Amino acid sequence: MRIVDLIQRKRDGGELGKEEIEFFIQGYHKGEIPDYQASALLMAIYFTGLTDVELVDWTQTILSLAPVFDLSDVPGPKVDKHSTGGVGDKTSMIVGPLAAAAGVTVPMVASRGMAYTGGTLDKFQSIPGFNAHLRSPEYKAALRSAGLAVIAEDEELTPAVKKIRALREATGTAESVPLITAALLSGKLAVGLDSIVFDVKTGSGALIKKMTDSRRLAQSLANVAKRMDKKTVCLISDMDQPLGNAIGNALEVMEAVEAMRGNGPPDLVELSLELAARIVRLAFPDRDLESAKEQVFKLLGDGSALKKFRQLIEIQGGNPQVIDSFELLPTSSEEFVVSSPRAGFVSRISADDIGQAVALLGAGRITPEAQIDPAVGIVLEHKVGDRVQAGERLCTIYYNSNAHLEEACQTVEDAFHISANAPETRPLVYEVLQ
């Protein structure tokens, strides 16, 4: 078997068999297939795609190289959610505790972020002492004790995913719907989940910006999961403006805590409740969606979710006092206010521009090895649809270095569009597929 033959067939729109997929993934994982040939195959897949059958084989091959966690001795239905990523998306820190408080076992897999800001793992690790690098016995113990636990999606958990993802990012194939599907499913299924809720973002701040492509990804995730006997719900949600008000790792931890205190931004709370209810519905099929929504709404309001979050932090070595004293989290030394140049309505806040600005401040990473500053970020004072006066504060930039401050400020100013008329209201969740 020759890799060049696989490249040519896929280039011409042909289908790869299970053994051929195993040959490629295992060979590349072992270093037997060079980057230039692997890149050629990924680019061919980018243009011609993979069938659902190929995707199942691809995903199962990746899982065969990973030490899949056996959680059969951990009680309760195991369900997690995954977002395709966006600007200000800190829902995992709210949804996990909410679902656990509702009786679901939530084995959370968190990854580091690239580009705009840190990922869920970076947000958790901005909490002093928090340890997400757990071994299987520690992970199971945390799940039994708290009903949820966070583990890092590192090289040991999904080694083939990490290697292929790095190549995708370096070759312009990161947006490939089938390759995203395989990476997301294998990363989640490596911890023995029964069901998954996917939050597929669409808009300027999402990895996939067009609705048609986001719908393709959601349908692909649902189809392949079903073929692998896993229950899945896929929501397509808006990422044209940042989610919530805080963008930046420690700032997003603070906002998540405030949301669990009942003081969160409406869009963040709405989406978190929707995702948590979908998890409860998957975990307990005899429940209807409305009763699940009522339950998680109550658990958010009575402090149960915040109690679970505190328990999670403590059991994974973090300092739970950060919930009561935000000054224990990393904080920036400087701040800069961006004001509205004119009176009118906020008609748009480009999530892409806000994300780029936060990355310039140091909250994101350009390379996998880059260090992030967990303290920096932006807090929005207004969202799309708000009426503002000339000179009124639009947002506050929190920073530690002024090396790229001027560029970041200009990018933030460009992100805000002020119009004479109020914009049309857009839905937060566009579609639900299952």
Image: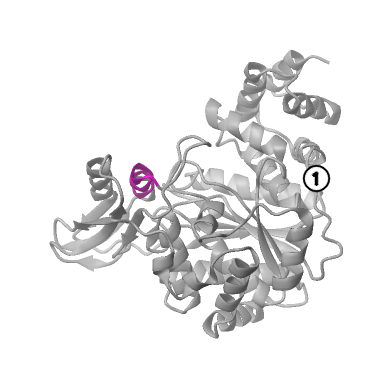
The image quadrant of residue 63 is: top right
Whether residue 361 appears in magenta in the rendering, the answer is yes
Around disc 1, counting alpha carbons within 10 Å, would you say few (fewer than 14), some (14 to 19), or many (20 or more)?
some
Which residue appears at 14% of the width and 55% of the height? 341
Which residue appears at 58% of the width and 49% of the height? 215
Which residues, given as a range, are shown in magenta?
354-362
Write down the residue under mark 1: 67
- Looking at the image, residue 134 sits to the left or right of residue 251; the answer is right
- Report if residue 300 is visible in the image: yes
Whether residue 286 appears in magenta in the rendering, the answer is no
5 over 332 or under it: above or below: above
Q: Nearer the viewer, residue 9 or 183?
A: 183
Q: Secondary structure at mark 1?
A: loop
The image quadrant of residue 242 is: bottom left
Q: Position of residue 256 (x, y in %)?
A: 48, 68
Q: How is the image coloured?
A: one colour
Which residue appears at 39% of the width and 67% of the height? 327
Type of amino acid at the residue the image marks with label 1: Pro
Q: Nearer the viewer, residue 217 or 107?
A: 107
